[in-house]
Image: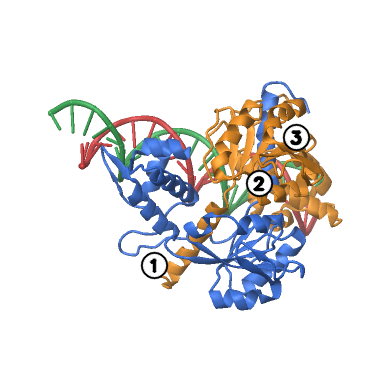
Chain colours: A blue, B orange, C red, D green
Amino acid sequence: MTDRADAGRDLGVRRGGVPEATVGRLPLYHRVLVDLADAGVDTVSSDALAATAGVSPAKLRKDLSFLGSYGTRGVGYEVSVLIEQIGAELGISSEWPVVIVGVGHLGHALANYGGFTSRGFRLVALFDEDPELVGTDVAGLVIRPFTDLPSVARAEGVTIGVVATPAAAAQDVADALVAAGVNSVLNFAPVVLTVPPSVDVRRVDLASELQILAFHQQRRGDELGQVAR
Amino acid sequence: MTDRADAGRDLGVRRGGVPEATVGRLPLYHRVLVDLADAGVDTVSSDALAATAGVSPAKLRKDLSFLGSYGTRGVGYEVSVLIEQIGAELGISSEWPVVIVGVGHLGHALANYGGFTSRGFRLVALFDEDPELVGTDVAGLVIRPFTDLPSVARAEGVTIGVVATPAAAAQDVADALVAAGVNSVLNFAPVVLTVPPSVDVRRVDLASELQILAFHQQRRGDELGQVAR
DNA sequence: TAGATTGTTAATCGATTAACAATC
DNA sequence: TAGATTGTTAATCGATTAACAATC
């Protein structure tokens, strides 16, 4: 859909070429490692870490190998080192400015989501069209009119935008985000957004997730001979 | 993590063996097709449908071929036929009873999500631990105490549960769901749930999605030589 | 018939897994 | 040294893509 898989480049040390499937799991590893650190653990084996993250040890080691060699044979991995390396890979050391457009229940939930700051993001603004909402305080931020988006996005250097509007509004919002210089979009609206190829869109869709579960559920039923449909 | 990929079986007509990647896209196709039907379109080519769904035509045709041959060469697909076939595959004709546990902002947003009924689901109950919330009306349902979960789940034959609680409560909730006979779980809490192998868990994680976007964003910056980190 | 488009084949690409040599 | 565990290799598996024969 977009340029999610790029060539990869060598910046001297070693860089580029982390497979997409691995990238998708790095946030999980990072979270699990932070939990372990909080629990006072300072060394883990790939077996133990894999079990905690719910993946196979081989997969975990392969994934980590793309970042470099940060383990000690016969010993395991130092939790703090791994947190730092994965964090660097994900850009958690940076503070990505993020805006949320659409402050219904979902926007509310997202705005109040605690993990933002600890994971390298800074929520800089909330936007909504509804005059009743504009001016209201949510998660320590005042909801601004949608028309303020361009100036705020430019001023704060926002590159990541979250679309939490109803489906009907999502494409217009996406257009406005792109026009304002945002080139990474997380879309919660149940529509396929049309954006320039340089813009990266990820879609999170409740109904799809449920339907995938239902598909497997149905299969299990079929296999047991329960449901004929 | 679970038995998401099963052997597949032949039930005479043709059945089983729809690849996991294809299953993941069927809800998208279904939604796009319903939108087309609403717009009065009754025939589409794979090229047009693929463009609307944001996938390649070859991939779309391959995906559809796993369900059977429902197109007409030289003409395209009848929208209504495709909707019906994909719907059947996903079990949309059934009415899967679903419960949501945790009625914070996210639970609220999910409960009010319109797509439930039109996609083969029936929201049968909302649960929360908070006595202030219990008894409150949300989306036409009265929030029930979490302790009611077993009786409701059994009575309604619930097999799909949504976890929308804070991270700290999620594992306990999952245990209770499993004990109550639920074997498909959609988890919005940022923790890895431990469940028996027979239970299918899907995790939706805002922070992970943002971090994946940030990773690509960072890569683009690196490539342009903008960010040193 | 001529043009269009499906359904399928074969080739390619990427991800996963198992196994084990390297090494702490 | 002996035991443990990483990092990597090679094999397998699954997904994607391109191309085109079948056929409406």
Tell me if residue B173 comes above or below residue A32 in the rendering. Answer: above
Q: Nearer the viewer, residue B169 or A98?
A: B169
Report the residue at 40% width, 39% height from top.
A49
Between label 1 and label 2, give the one nearer the viewer: 1
Read off the residue under disc 2. Answer: B25
Q: Which residue is mark 1?
A: B229
Residue at the image position 73 percent from the left and 37 percent from the top: B144
Which of disc 2 and disc 1 is earlier in sequence? 2
Q: CA distance from mark 3 to mark 2?
A: 20 Å
Residue kind at label 2, given as amino acid type: Arg
SS category of the residue bearing label 1: loop
Q: Position of residue A45 (x, y in %)?
A: 34, 38
Q: Is residue A54 left or right of residue A101?
A: left
Chain letter of disc 2 in the image: B
Distance from the alpha carbon under mark 3 to that under mark 1: 48 Å
Q: Secondary structure at mark 3?
A: strand
Tell me which amino acid carries mark 1: Arg
**Residue B124, percent from left and from top:** 77, 36
Work out whether residue A6 or residue B204 is closer to the camera in this orientation and state it: B204
Decide if residue A119 is in sight here.
Answer: no
Q: Check residue B96 in the rendering and tell me which mark sits there, or answer none.
A: 3
* Few, some or many residues within 10 Å of mark 1 (<14, 14–19, 20+): few
Q: Is the Cβ of the residue at disc 3 closer than 8 Å to that at disc 1?
A: no
- Amino acid carrying label 3: it is Trp
Does mark 1 fall on the same chain as mark 3? Answer: yes
Read off the chain for label 3. Answer: B
Q: Is residue A63 left or right of residue B42?
A: left
